[in-house]
Amino acid sequence: MSVLEDKVGPNKMSFTLKDGNTPFQFPVNPEEVNISRSKGYETVNMLEHGEFDFAQGEKVKEITFSSFFPKRYDPSYCMDEKYFLDPRVAMNVLNTFLISKKPLRFIISETGVNVPVFLVSLNSSFRGGETGDIYFDLTLRTWRDSKVEKVGSGAAASKSGSRTDLKKSSKTYTVKAGDSLSKIAKLELGNSSKWNEIYKLNTKIIGSDPNRIKPGQKLVMP
């Protein structure tokens, strides 16, 4: 008898996968259910300092268990007869869940387990002397909806429209000995005749005479 059955009783608990409003109840409760939880880490290798781990939040949970689909209904260990299926039919249902791109809901009655999941692994086997019974192991992974807002519509658009763009930092040039505005214009802008554009942007720094620039002055470039 499983730990869960000890707590709530074997006849009360049921294990169900729901595809929308359609329930698929496992006919025989598993002896054990394993729920794996872990925290995600990103490992960064920093030169001369070694490796550092940075927490990335909780990873997706994994739920694993094993059971079987009996060929004949036996009320001593089988659940509700109205959900009882031929083992091959039951396996086909699980195979459909396996390839489905829609999340299911996994419910263990009388417990707090009621979560959206994907069926990600399914293995089946047959045992000698138990003709028609199909044994299986499966793995479920909990599913979390990734809510991504579309840019360009609704509230998201108004927020993006009202957001102030960051100004690009202006390019500057530090005056050196022997420089002139026409020389700087030739070197930086490719045309010496554009010296006047530099002067207009830097009149307060240079002063009234464009020919009197001084080494060390930082000029904003067009």
Image: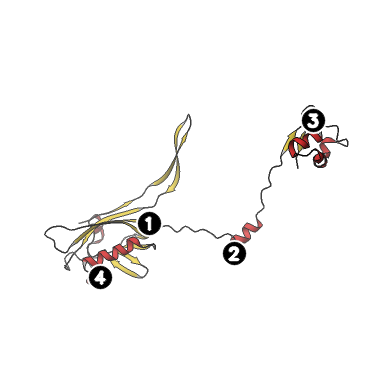
The residues tagged by marks 1 and 3 sit, at their Cα atoms, a distance apart of 68 Å
Q: CA distance from mark 2 to mark 4?
A: 46 Å
Amino acid type at mark 3: Asp
Element type at marker 4?
Answer: helix
Distance from disc 3 to disc 4, alpha carbons, whole Å, reads 91 Å
- Decide which of tag 2 and tag 4 comes sooner along the chain: 4
- Label 2 to label 3, Cα distance in Å? 55 Å
Q: Is residue 109 visible?
A: no
Residue 88 falls in image quadrant: bottom left
What amino acid is at disc 2? Answer: Gly
In the displayed structure, does residue 160 sit left or right of residue 29?
right
Which residue is label 3 attached to? 179
**For numbered disc 3, what is the local secondary structure?**
loop
Going 22% across and 71% down the picture, which residue do you hit? 81
Which of the numbered marks, if any, corresponds to residue 83? 4
The residue carrying pointer 2 sits among few (fewer than 14), some (14 to 19) or many (20 or more) residues within 10 Å by Cα, namely: few
Q: Earlier in the sequence, mark 3 or mark 4?
A: 4
Q: Earlier in the sequence, mark 1 or mark 3?
A: 1
Q: Judge whether 62 appears above or below 183 on screen.
A: below
Check disc 3: other Cα within 10 Å, few if <14, some if 14-19, many if 20+: some
Residue that label 1 marks: 142
* Element type where label 1 sits in the image: strand
Q: Residue furthest bottom?
A: 82
Of the two numbered discs 2 and 3 in the rendering, the one whose residue sits closer to the viewer: 3
- Of residue 213 and residue 195, the one placed in the foreground of this image is 195
Q: Residue at x 26, y 61 (%)?
A: 8
Instruction: Identify residue type, mark 1.
Output: Thr
